[in-house]
Amino acid sequence: MPPQKRATLLIKNIGQLVTLAGPAPRLGAQMKQLEIIKNGGIAAAADEIIAVGKSVEIERQTEIAESCMVIDAKEAVVTPGLIDPHTHPVFSMTREEEFEMRTLGKTYEEIAQAGGGIRASVRDLRTAPRELILKQTKARLDRLLAHGITTAEAKSGYGLSTDSEIMQLEIIKKLDETHAIELVPTFLGAHEIPDEFQNKRSEYIRLLIEEMLPVVAFRQLAEFCDVFCEEHVYTIDESRKIQEAAKKLGLGLKFHADELKSTGGAKLAASLGAVSADHLVYISDSGIKALAASRTVATLLPGTSFSLRSKQYAPARKLIEAGAIVALATDCNPGSSYTESLPFITTLASLQMRLTAAEALSAITVNAACAIGRQNKLGRLEPGMQADLVIWNMQDYREMPYHYAVNLVNQVIKKGKQVLVN
Ligand code: NIG
Ligand code: FE
């Protein structure tokens, strides 16, 4: 038997240790089973969890390294580090005037067609100094971490030229190396058609396929390729063409699908074996069936419906009951959902999509890990998994959706190290 690893981190006296041990993904009724250990304890050696159980047993049985950090959780809740599987954090200018225009009655599409929206962010980012964008993006990651997020998917998509898309992916790479948050990079050159290609969209699509994607893949700047498949943006045929090219280059696939209208994006995502199809507010019944029959994760972003003042939320209950893999994300971006708080997203999921606290927690841990292809390492507290966890100022995990718009994070541990204490 190999010698037991010595603990470098031990957390004791955990009131509710929410492990989510077991299957990844969690489907249907499994989303309600969090595998909570009362009076729990957990030990890690370097970045890996080595023991999970009752506090007294962990304290008695674990061999401790001299330098071991011991934390008394004082009966609080501990969960896996939260995973945000859909963010657009690399932008410069914010768009509060658009938020106000919506307050006064304009719609997101009207604002975009009048020259605002994504293309306004693109015009700005192309001329913003790189150091400024880096600093602004870092501040957003700080806020994500402060809300208990230890891993986030991060998209490009506000450059829409080869150089500026690469620049955004380089910023993501640099921050992944230097920030406590782990980032999973996604290339979103197909976020919009930039101004200079408005009347020659096929030329932009050619540039995406023949120039941008090959460079991104060759330089390993992204794990995934995403497309905004939507009316007025990329059609189903254009999206298929772009994603088939990305797949050939070895990239995994993600989709912005059925967000504003039902266009069949979810079905296309499932048929191409995408890792996730995101938004899905207007997914059809056949789209739900297609996702349920696939391994493509349905990543729902209720912050977007909320911030767009829409009454329409993705049919989460139907998706869960059909057997689709359901995850939740912030969609953190300057236009349709400017928030770094996944806990607040669980409030929206509970009140607007009828997810229980347990289902919502499964959706931002184990199932979110599946949405970024990290389910073997992240999203559950079990021996062998990465030691990413959050100690909360809560006695009961159901406080997460219930006690909204305040930050209840007490401490964040990433790769076995304490990275934040509130
Ligand atoms: O996920 N849908 C496309 N992209 C973002 C919006 C980006 C923006 O408005 O800047 C979204 O909603
Ligand atoms: Fe998005």
Image (cartoon, helix red, strand yellow):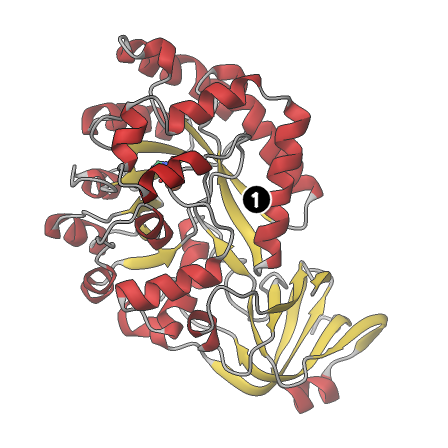
The residue at 21%/56% (across/down) is 292
Residue 15, quarter of the rendered image: bottom right
The residue at 63%/64% (across/down) is 387
Q: Position of residue 50 (x, y in %)?
A: 66, 71
The residue at 61%/34% (across/down) is 173
Residue 244 lies, with reference to residue 420, above or below; the image says above
The residue indicated by pointer 1 is 183
The residue at 37%/34% (across/down) is 226
Q: Position of residue 18 (x, y in %)?
A: 51, 76
Q: Position of residue 209 (x, y in %)?
A: 37, 17
Q: Position of residue 149 (x, y in %)?
A: 56, 57
Residue 327 lies, with reference to residue 359, above or below; the image says above
Q: Is residue 390 left or right of residue 273?
A: right
Q: Count the numbered circles shown.
A: 1
From where the camera sits, is residue 296 visible?
no
Q: Is residue 135 left or right of residue 209?
A: right
Residue 264 lies, with reference to residue 385, above or below; the image says above
Does any atom of ligand 2 lie closer than 8 Å to the CB of label 1?
Answer: no
From where the camera sits, is residue 91 visible?
yes
